[in-house]
Image (cartoon, rainbow, N blue to C red):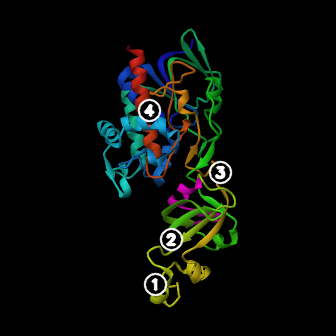
Amino acid sequence: MPKTYTLAVIGGGASGLLGAVRAAQLLGGKQVILLEAAPRVGKKLLATGNGRCNLTNLRVDVCHYHGDTVRAQKLLTAFPPQRILAYFQQLGLLCREQSEGRVYPYSMQSATVLNVLRGQLSCLGVAEQCGFAVQTIQRRHGDYRVQAKTGECVLAKYLLLSTGGLAQAGAENGYSLLEQLHHSTTPLKPALAPVRVREVRLVRSLKGVRTQAAVTLSHGGKVLRQTKGEVQFTEHGLSGICIFELSRDALPGDVISLDLVPEYSLPQLQKLTGGRLDGVLHKALAQVCPFEQCKHFCFTVEQAEDFRHAQVTAGGVPLEQLDNTCQSLFSPGVWLTGELLNVDGDCGGFNLHWAWSTALCAAQAIFEEAHP
């Protein structure tokens, strides 16, 4: 006979890990099992923030999110950064603020966050089962029967589905499970990704070069979005945080214009440098960028990189299919969190903040459902 739990958490990423910890604190660790398809939990979490884990942002606001932002507003208001950080501090994780409101673990190591969460699961007695790739979910006699591809089964009264999106995912994902639970998704596309451009020979000659720039994305002369920050030239295009933030809106044929000297006008530069860029820009840039183009160094979008290179998935389960606690309106006793939902954030800790917030909200609701 399969073992029965109060809660089965499906997915050992950021949202699943924190949801399992909080649920175990409320329900008792022996009542919770965490199921992960991969050989270990937290693989993507380890890579976040270039291995430093930018876990939230003190400037969290709905303006930094995309998708079902109207419905997301209430949850974001209920779980501000201070509440998330206070909870992590209770777990023993100290954090520090860096530039632009970004918050990292004090160690500046993603592994610290994962170690704290796994340590809590162990102390609470939560069963952690990796290599459990869920194939089917069926409801029988008030419980959910969760079966792996190996045939192994687990029974649970409640489910927390936190399988993440398609970005940087392996062969396993939770979208087939959503169909079994009667949910649909909006169209899915990569977000926060590098962008391939048509001027391949030019960017290839600059591969590895990094420069600060003001960046404009436009279509037919109409400005679509503007940002600024470090731009990195790659084998096939452009990368860097500011490029990531443009990528969700970049379509083939759009133009990305780099202002390589945003602090100066062209006449000022002419006066100060005599029309030379070798004392202003990286040597490789100065060699290929004509002086008169340094304020508008342009590239034509080929496409945003695919899910393998994206940080998050744009699109997902519409929030109108859930109640205010992230519980499914179609499959009672099932909660959906994190990247599965039709909410994605800008760079800077906003996506992890959404993962934590939905997990804590769902865990509290599961406890209240189990103990009315």
Distance between the Cα atoms at labels 2 and 4? 38 Å
Q: Tell which circle, 1 or 4, labels the residue nearer the N-terminal end.
A: 1
In the image: residue 141, left or right of residue 90:
right
Q: Could you tell me which secondary element the residue under label 4 belongs to?
A: helix
Q: Which mark is residue 306?
A: 3
Q: Residue at x 52, y 27 (%)?
A: 322
Magenta stretch in the rendered image:
233-247
Distance between the Cα atoms at labels 4 and 3? 27 Å
Query: Which amino acid, by three-letter code, is at mark 1?
Result: Gln
Q: Tell which circle, 2 or 3, labels the residue nearer the N-terminal end.
A: 2
**Cβ atoms under marks 1 and 4 closer than 8 Å:** no
Please indicate, yes or no, whether residue 265 appears anywhere in the rendered image.
Answer: yes
Query: Which amino acid, by three-letter code, is at mark 3?
Result: Asp
Residue denoted by label 1: 268
Q: Quadrant of residue 134?
A: top right
Classify 10 Å Cα crowding around label 2: few (below 14), some (14-19), many (20 and above): some
Residue denoted by label 2: 211
Task: State the quadrant of the N terminus.
Answer: top right
Q: Position of residue 298 (x, y in %)?
A: 62, 70
Classify 10 Å Cα crowding around label 1: few (below 14), some (14-19), many (20 and above): few
Distance between the Cα atoms at labels 2 and 3? 24 Å
